[in-house]
Amino acid sequence: MKKKNFIALIMGTIGGLLFALGMCMCLLPEWAAFKQGVVVAALGVIVLIAMALTVRKMSGKPAIKLNAKAIGTVVYGIIATIVLGVGMCMVMVWDMMLWGIIVGIIGIVLLLCLIPICKGLE
């Protein structure tokens, strides 16, 4: 395993766990830890951003390239994630099982379309 992959593994795991724990703290009223959850989730996001920057630096690539394709891809990913999340909310919160499953599957398909958008087809 290359050093950059090991660093990405460790930082990704830590950042993901912090973010997930923070979201649980925010969204579970039984825990009564909304403000602390926001802080923990923000720390997770910071670790994940630092991981992305560190791995790109170790690969010899520039930190971030901002162009129209990158911005469009991020916006598309955000929209696809929101569609998936709405489908999950429809099933678990709003008690709309059939339509929630349909919207969730559409969100998953939209997220799967990110692979050819980012990597291209050969």
Image: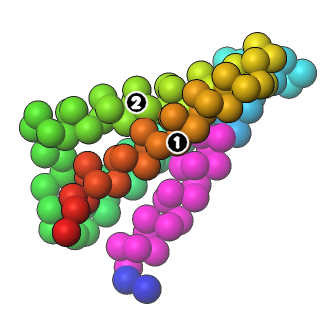
Residue 115 locus on image (x, y percent): 34, 54
Residue 88 is drawn in which quadrant?
A: top right
Question: In the image, what residue occupies the spot 73% across and 26% down?
Answer: 98
Badge 2 vs badge 1, beta-carbon distance below 8 Å: no
**Residue 9 versus residue 67: which sits nearer the camera?**
67
Residue 73 is drawn in which quadrant?
A: top left
Magenta stretch?
Answer: 3-20
Residue mark closest to the camera, 2 vs 1:
1
Q: Is residue 120 above or below residue 5?
A: above
Q: Is residue 55 above or below residue 90?
A: below
Q: Amino acid at mark 2?
A: Ile
The image's mark for residue 78 is 2
Q: Which residue is mark 1?
A: 108
Question: In the image, what residue occupies the spot 35% across and 73% down?
Answer: 4
The extreme right residue here reads 30
Residue 96 locus on image (x, y percent): 75, 18
Name the quarter where the C terminus is drawn: bottom left
- Disc 2 is placed on an element classified as helix
